[in-house]
Image (cartoon, helix red, strand yellow):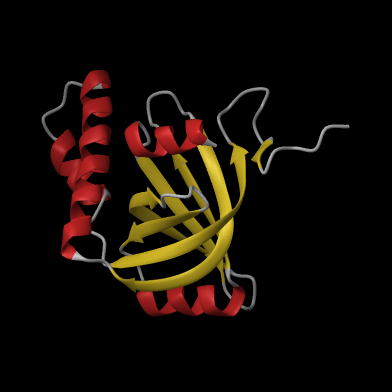
Amino acid sequence: PHKIIRFLEERANLGFAGTRDAALVPLGHRLSAWQVDAAGRALTAFMRPFSEARFVESLRENGAIALTIGEMTTHETYQIKGRYLSHRPAQGVEAVLADRVRERLSKAMHAQYQDERIDSFVRASIPAPTLAVAVEVTDVFVQTPGPGAGERIAPAPETR
């Protein structure tokens, strides 16, 4: 939905990717940035996985990936489930996407905490991406704490 795309592009400042290997062992990865394609049906996740080889192997074995992307101060959060399409090295120009996420997170943290160490913390927690993973979006769920948490919002729930 357009509302979610705007949220991802303008407000979201934290992201994680979850995969699992052939033995269904979960693997978690911190996202540096994300970008929705023009059609709004796919997304590229940018990251520096702890083990790139293990991460790519899990995607090839299983194909399933879940991205949880949110905003720190409001806890507005969405889970995007999808299928792995492809991967490639992140390009230098794409580092600006991680810079934008860092700026949003720093701004949010500075508003809550008066600590000069915030910028160095944010830089360390959102590394420059080394990998770009294209994901076909299959489902979007609300994960914001509250009565709607867990509800599917895309594709739209069937009316009964």
Residue 53 placement (x, y as % from top left): 39, 80
Indicate the quadrant containing the C terminus: top left, top right, bottom left or bottom right: top right
Residue 105 relative to residue 149: left or right: left
Residue 64 relative to residue 157: left or right: left
Residue 50 relative to residue 70: left or right: left
Q: Nearer the viewer, residue 14 or 141?
A: 141
Residue 62 placement (x, y as % from top left): 61, 74
Q: Residue furthest front?
A: 39
In terms of image quadrants, where is residue 9? Answer: top left
Q: Residue at x 44, y 64 (%)?
A: 134
Q: Residue at x 83, y 32 (%)?
A: 159
Q: Residue furthest left?
A: 116
Task: Indicate whether 73 appears above or below 22.
Answer: above
Q: Residue at x 67, y 44 (%)?
A: 155
Residue 65 placement (x, y as % from top left): 55, 61
Indicate the quadrant containing the N terminus: top left, top right, bottom left or bottom right: top right
Q: Nearer the viewer, residue 145 or 141?
A: 141
In terms of image quadrants, where is residue 87? Answer: bottom left
